[in-house]
Image: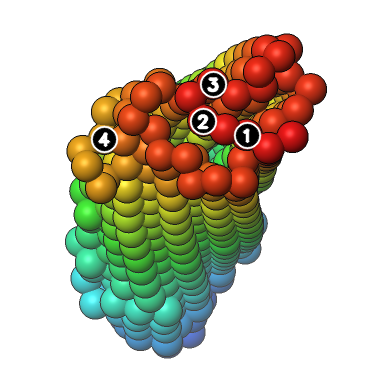
Amino acid sequence: MFHALASCVSATPRRLGMVFLATVVFSGSDAAQAQVCGQTLVANTTLTANLLDCPGNGLVVGANNIVINLNGRTIDGVGLGVGILNNGFDNVTIRNGRIQEFDFGVQLNPGTLGNLVETLTVTGNEFVGIQLSNADANNRIRNNTITAQAQRGLVLLNGSTGNVITFNTITFNQGMSVELESSGSNTITDNQINNGGDGGLRLTASSSNVILRNTITDTSDSGVSFESASNSNTFSRNTLARTGDSSLSVTSSNSNRIESNVVTQIGDAGLVMTTSNLNLVLTNTIRGTSDCGIYLQFSNDNTVRGNDVQFNPCGLDLAHSNNNLIESNNASNSQGSGITLEDSEDNTVRLNQSNSSTATGIYVVGVAAPGAGNLITTNTTNGNLGDGIVIASSGHTVTGNTANNNDGWGIYAVPGTTNGGTNHASGNSEAAQCFGIVCLP
């Protein structure tokens, strides 16, 4: 049986020193004293010294049900290998130390189940700080600081399923802060994700994940993006601020639930949805964007309900998007029009508020085919600096709306607009109050 070495580095200067590399397996009581770069561990281990300038892997997991306690020590590499590598062992705990300057800080590879990775500082690695690849289930990554990787911070890929990522600080990584690729049913909750050199969180072909109560700020690109059939995810009660692009981007992804998030100070639109269907966008607060609060393009059959999209250049904009329900949103105080529909059909726009905007409250443009027009009903559009409601193209229906005290028409509708009745308008600058339809006072 081999006995532990005092250190894996000689007394010569760092990076130039002679490194002792053990390709041995420790077991029993010797494992508790091991201090060797590249060591494979098969029993509980507590470090008593730093491992410096490891030329390959730092430590390798070699058994189920063991605890690796770094004991506040540092495992340090030379830009190669993995700080701690687990190639398929279950119920392993890795905790309490610093891992730096490898290709990967920590890897949980195919077959790993029930691992706990906690209270680590993972920093300065080349590719990824912590990576789960086809990690089976119930791996928990919690209370770690993952910072300053040359590329990505935390990655789940290749079918990593049923894992929990919680209470981590993921910051100043030069690539994507958190990324899921072809991985589903994971929970990402209560993390601080900020200062990403790319975006904050990206899901690619990843479905049924729960993303809850995270704070995502100061990213150079989108705060969060769903891409390539990332379906049936729940994104709820997160806070997003100061993203360089849209705070939330949904592309070719369906049946997601985006609910009760707070979005502020965004470099583009708050939420951009492209070629995505059957999504629920509910009770979000999106303010202070550089473009629209919510923008749908080529997206159908979505429900957008109860959102506060005030104080943006525009509140809600639909382009080439059909059969959506736009209901009970507040798009007031926009710097442009509050709600705009462009070349979109069969949408129901009802019970929304679009007041006090610098342009039109609700603006509809694009001729609808017979029977395929939009229904604009029971909305309130008061005190806008333009018209209350403008129907600029034929084929649409206007009914039951209120349009008072606008600096133009209450409702302006071109010929071919259907008046469903009981529209109300008073106090508008145009004495006739409405054009193209009859309004009640």
Q: In the rendered view of the protein, which quadrant contains the N terminus?
A: bottom left
Q: Identify the residue position indicated by label 4 in the image.
A: 368
Disc 2 vs disc 1: Cβ atoms closer than 8 Å? yes
Residue sitting at 66 percent across and 18 percent down?
Answer: 432
Disc 2 vs disc 3: Cβ atoms closer than 8 Å? yes
Q: Which mark is residue 225?
A: none
Q: Is residue 379 visible?
A: yes
333 horizontally vs 40: left or right: right
Q: Identify the residue position indicated by label 2 in the image.
A: 437
The local secondary structure at tag 2 comes to loop
207 horizontally vs 222: left or right: left
Q: Could you say where residue 31 lies in the image, as x and y percent from the top left?
A: 44, 76
Given residues 172 and 45, the one toward you in this image is 172
The quarter holding residue 352 reads top right
288 w.r.t. 142: above or below:
above
- Circle 4 packing at 10 Å, graded few (<14), some (14-19), many (20+), is some
For the residues carrying marks 1 and 4, which lies nearer the camera in this image? 1
The quarter holding residue 410 reads top right
Residue sitting at 32 percent across and 42 percent down?
Answer: 373
Q: Identify the residue position indicated by label 3 in the image.
A: 435
Colouring rule applied to residues: rainbow
Label 1 to label 3, Cα distance in Å?
Answer: 9 Å
Label 1 to label 4, Cα distance in Å?
Answer: 23 Å
The local secondary structure at tag 3 comes to strand
What amino acid does circle 4 point to?
A: Ala
Given residues 193 and 143, the one toward you in this image is 193
Q: Earlier in the sequence, mark 2 or mark 4?
A: 4
Q: Identify the residue position indicated by label 1 in the image.
A: 439
